[in-house]
Image: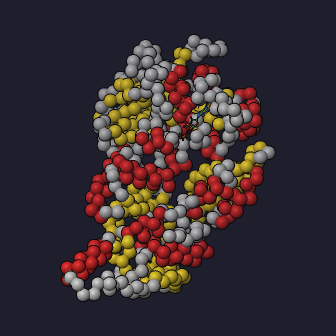
């Protein structure tokens, strides 16, 4: 690829900040962010038509297949204004791609903090959705200038006039200020690039001050170690500097710095307002954390930039290899994934039912799914994951506080108070489904905080909901009750005191740790009945009667019984050859090996997998599984 960077005034490290525009594109999922980014890469000639492939910036296979962006990237694009009074002006655009999913809100907020402007992209056939709003609020909180853009105007179903009204109403501008584009055909995109130069402010910073750069992403590369993406706020970072991470004080030798356009290109320095990458040879993204400030070791800045937060897992789940001998392989795979994922947290745990595994912490359900899929796909592991749970804080009678990340470790008795995490959720729905949405949220212990009409047929509902109630099938339920029209976004919003209990499931009097769940008192009965009924259909009959009980402490709340059978494999075999009998007995023994012994009960591993893999949630409104 020929370098497209102007070696003169626009060279990295020598660029006048006045020419730079740092921006991001924010949009609801599927509103066409990646497609628009592709068109921009092409129009600015950073990628030529021959090399263009769809979603150029989404590098991970899983991302490409699912069409979602997980990791943000930054691309430097030269652009010469084509029209208007600034015609002919050379600019350097840094497009910072932000992840689109709620699990990664913190990463989104850091990417936004690296920009001066945001292109708010809305599908002209769909209109505003929940994530459009959530992202807009985040952009406004970060003081970004917002350019409203309606995308997909080439679609016959597009209604740009209608949605321009809605969008203008939302951000308080004139409907004519909404730029209309098609990321697919490229229509309107050059004009949008011109407007980016015109409307967004160039970065400001003190070139003479000690260097300060904010990390907005860091990724692990097998060949190069950790690649850290930064935006320089003040001063200058030179290729041979020794740098210091301000949150930990760790120092590193710089091996390389440069910009992405759209592949890595080495540079001598990065100056005020510039966006680029650093490589130091560290092998673990934890040493180069999103939100941290990089400064010069020899001449350090006095204060770090604000906004740094440690990533905190919100959802926990146990991951167990189906084949116990894969345990070391699972450990190795997790160690590798951790290098690239500062938010992944795990520690070994043992389950009576599932054997050796790991308790893993994730940012949310999508994060869990991605990690699980990568483990299965990239490392060839077959895994069972236990039902995800949130983190509870329990205060005991004697005032001790404990954090519970695993329901089976929930203390029995002596609990004074329990707190569970809550989220602030925004649901956008057409008018007709308001009732259905409210019913769902109420059923999940939601508290209505407010309701606004965005237009005559679109309503924004704001709820606080326990996180535990939405991590299972809330989104699926929302979609099915609104025929797919409602959209959801949420963000953590502290914790609340709740009436929670632990429900244990006992097989033949022995608790099965993998099925313990912490649920609201009112839903405990449903959960118990559902799981007991499901297990009854999944566990084969044994030589003796096996009770399945659901219990809170020592109080049994539900019971099912697996009736006894007496299977005499030799029954049909009277007389005859002894070797035939032996063969039958051997065969029976083989079959028994595949069972797991849980206490005195033999449970086929498939029963666990089946019982854990349905969408039935501890919120208790799922139906018992059928065989
Ligand atoms: N007709 C038409 N389709 C478009 C246009 N832009 C995007 N699409 C289609 O819309 C779908 C979603 O586009 P993406 O670019 O993947 O959307 P995205 O916002 O990046 O999605 P996420 O990365 O999942 O957030 C794809 O099938 C695109 O082909 C457009 O201007 N016109």
Q: Is residue 429 visible?
A: yes
Asked whether, in this view, residue 171 is left or right of residue 368, the answer is right
Q: Look at the picture and state if 293 lies above or below 37.
A: below
Locate residue 596, reporting x and y percent: 34, 73
Which part of the image, by quadrant, shows the N terminus?
top left
Front position in the image: 561 or 54: 561
Along the viewing direction, whichever of 339 and 503 lies nearer the viewer:
503
Q: Is residue 480 above or below residue 230?
A: below
Nearer-the-camera pick, 82 or 494: 82
Rendering coords of residue 489 (x, y %): 61, 50
List x then y, in percent, for residue 328. 27, 58
Determine the residue located farthest toward the top in the rendered image: 88
Q: Residue at x 32, y 71 (%)?
A: 594
Task: Count the marks.
Answer: 0
Q: Residue at 26% across / 79% down in the picture? A: 585
> In which image quadrant can residue 340 be found?
top left
Q: Is residue 263 found left or right of 444 in the rendered image?
A: left
Q: Residue 301, percent across and down?
A: 42, 36
Image check: 551 left or right of 156?
left
User: Which residue lies at the image location 38% right of the left edge and 28% below the top edge?
Assistant: 264
């Amino acid at each position: 690829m020929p370098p497209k960077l102007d070696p003169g005034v626009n060279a990295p490290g020598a660029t006048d900040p006045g020419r730079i525009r740092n921006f991001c594109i924010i949009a609801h999922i599927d509103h066409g962010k990646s497609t628009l980014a592709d068109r921009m890469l092409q129009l600015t000639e950073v990628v030529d038509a021959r090399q263009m492939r769809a979603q150029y910036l989404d590098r991970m296979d899983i991302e490409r297949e699912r069409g979602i962006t997980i990791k943000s990237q930054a691309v430097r694009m030269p652009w010469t204004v084509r029209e208007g009074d600034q015609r002919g002006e050379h600019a350097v655009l840094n497009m910072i791609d932000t992840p689109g999913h709620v699990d990664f809100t913190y990463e989104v907020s850091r990417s936004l903090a690296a920009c001066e402007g945001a292109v708010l992209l809305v599908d002209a056939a769909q209109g505003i959705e929940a994530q459009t709003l959530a992202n807009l609020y985040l952009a406004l909180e970060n003081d970004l200038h917002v350019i409203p853009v309606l995308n997909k105007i080439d679609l016959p179903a597009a209604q740009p006039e209608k949605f321009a009204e809605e969008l203008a109403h939302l951000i308080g501008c004139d409907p004519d200020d909404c730029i209309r584009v098609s990321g697919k055909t490229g229509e309107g995109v050059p004009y949008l690039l011109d407007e980016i130069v015109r409307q967004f402010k160039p970065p400001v910073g003190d070139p003479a001050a000690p260097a300060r750069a904010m990390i907005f992403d860091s990724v692990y590369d097998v060949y190069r170690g950790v690649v850290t993406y930064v935006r320089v706020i003040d001063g200058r970072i030179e290729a041979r500097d020794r740098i210091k991470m301000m949150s930990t004080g760790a120092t590193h030798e710089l091996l390389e710095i440069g910009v992405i356009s759209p592949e890595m290109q080495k540079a001598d320095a990065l100056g005020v307002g510039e966006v680029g990458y650093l490589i130091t040879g560290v092998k673990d993204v934890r040493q180069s954390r999103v939100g941290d400030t990089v400064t010069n070791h020899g001449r350090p800045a006095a204060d770090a930039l604000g906004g740094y937060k440690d990533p905190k897992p919100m959802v926990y789940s146990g991951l167990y290899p189906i084949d116990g001998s894969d345990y070391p392989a699972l450990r190795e795979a997790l160690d590798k994934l951790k290098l690239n994922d500062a938010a992944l947290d795990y520690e070994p745990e043992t389950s009576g039912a599932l054997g050796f595994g790991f308790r893993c912490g994730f940012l949310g359900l999508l994060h869990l799914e991605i990690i699980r899929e990568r483990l299965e796909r990239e490392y060839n592991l077959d895994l069972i994951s236990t039902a995800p749970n949130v983190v509870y804080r329990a205060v005991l009678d004697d005032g001790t506080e404990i954090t519970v990340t695993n329901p089976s470790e929930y203390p029995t008795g002596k609990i004074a108070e329990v707190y569970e995490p809550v989220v602030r959720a925004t649901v956008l729905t057409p008018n007709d489904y308001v009732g259905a949405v409210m019913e769902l949220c109420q059923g999940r212990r939601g508290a209505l905080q407010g309701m606004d009409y965005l237009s005559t047929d679109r309503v924004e509902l704001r709820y606080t909901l326990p996180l535990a109630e939405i991590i299972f099938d809330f989104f699926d339920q929302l979609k099915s009750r609104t025929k797919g029209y409602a959209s959801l976004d949420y963000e953590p919003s502290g914790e609340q005191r709740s009436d929670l209990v632990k429900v244990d499931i006992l097989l033949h009097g022995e608790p099965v740790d993998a099925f313990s769940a912490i649920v609201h008192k009112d839903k405990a009965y449903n959960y118990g009945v559902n799981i007991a009924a499901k297990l009854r259909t999944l566990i084969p009959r044994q030589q003796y009667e096996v009770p399945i009980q659901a219990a809170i402490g020592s109080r049994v709340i539900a019971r099912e019984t697996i009736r006894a059978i007496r299977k005499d494999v030799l029954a049909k075999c009277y007389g005859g050859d002894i070797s035939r009998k032996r063969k039958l007995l051997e065969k029976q023994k083989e079959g028994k090996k595949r069972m797991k012994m849980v206490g005195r009960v033999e449970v086929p591993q498939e029963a666990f997998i089946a019982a854990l893999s349905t969408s039935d949630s501890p919120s208790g409104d799922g139906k018992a599984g059928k065989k």
